[in-house]
Image: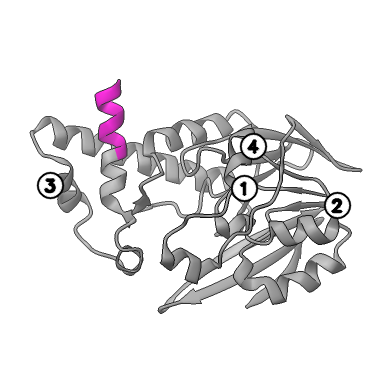
Amino acid sequence: MIQEFQHEDIHCVKVTVSFSGISINVHLYFVDGLLIDTGPSRAKKNLIPIFQSLPISQIVLTHHHEDHTGMSSWVADHLNKPIYIHETGVSDCQQPSNIPFYRRVFWGNNTPFQPEPIPQIIETENHNFEVIHTPGHAHDHIVLFNKEKGWLFGGDLFVVSRPKSMFSFESVPVMVKSIRKVFDYDFSTLFCSHAGVLVNGKEHLASKLQYLEDIQGQVKKLHQKGMNAKEIQKELFPKIHSMQILSGFENSPLHMVNSILNNVENA
């Protein structure tokens, strides 16, 4: 399902994908010729007419995951416009995706394409966007900041305020550092790839930061008492959620705990 709406000068596209009783939203944003993310290939039939109708002059990808880049090969082949991603994500996009089966079914597969390393500043006719590297969810994750409007296009930096499960490639400590980094910027509206438009964006991110810092503190205390990762997981996150089962526990609270403990051991 696709919904289109406007917020200020920004054209927003909400893609809803459902599988096995789980529905997830992905938002794409278009402003002043700039398309931010291309969405999942599973929504190809609905997204192509939208891309054809928009005066797209350049594309920025917040990171290489398939729900954000699935349509990028089509965009590259048919629109012939520059596609940018953080330099550490270029090689991920050039190779055939090797993602688990459930993610291929949920979002669709990625076809390789050739993006360019993103410059420090993205310029459009009327706006400048500063590129901020914010790893934690993905090694190549970036956000875009516009000072004049107080906009922050946050990719997957926020998603939810109180995550209880993460992927093995995510890191709570690294995510905390990235969220702290963006607090140096004076933004108000957060354009999240999954939660949508958050008018009080800084407050939402502050809530997530506090939660993650609290979780870090609890994990460290339990570890000091002699509990291992699985014991800590059962203590802090006893419930099993549907996404954990669907993913075969590729998405699991154990990964949250391990990312914190690994950081303690490497400190």
CA–CA distance in space, label 2 to label 1: 22 Å
Eye-nearest disc, 3 or 1: 1
Q: Is residue 212 above or below residue 265?
A: below
Disc 1: CA contacts within 10 A as few (<14), some (14-19) or many (>=20) = many
Q: Magenta residues?
A: 259-267
Residue 55: quarter of image: bottom right
* Residue at 46% from the left image edge and 55% from the top image edge: 160
- Measure the C-alpha gap from mark 4 to mark 2: 20 Å
Label 2 environment density (alpha carbons within 10 Å; few <14, some 14–19, many ≥20): some
Please tell me which residue is depicted at 56% across the width and 57% down the height of the picture: 66
The residue that label 1 is drawn on is 93
Q: Position of residue 128 (x, y in %)?
A: 81, 37
Residue type pointed to by label 1: Cys
- Mark 4 or 3 closer to N-term? 4
Mark sitting on residue 136: none
Q: Could you say which is closer to the camera, residue 156 or residue 102? A: 102
| Secondary structure predominantly adopted by residues drawn in magenta | helix
**What residue is disc 4 on?**
86
Q: Earlier in the sequence, mark 4 or mark 1?
A: 4
Q: Which callout, 4 or 2, points to the residue nearer the camera?
A: 4
In this rendered view, identify the residue nearer to me: 93 or 141. 93
Q: Which residue is mark 2?
A: 33
Secondary element at image label 2: loop
Badge 3 is on which residue? 231
Assign a secondary structure to mark 3: helix
How far is disc 4 from disc 3 in space, using C-alphas?
37 Å
Residue at figure coordinates x 41%, y 79% from the top left: 21
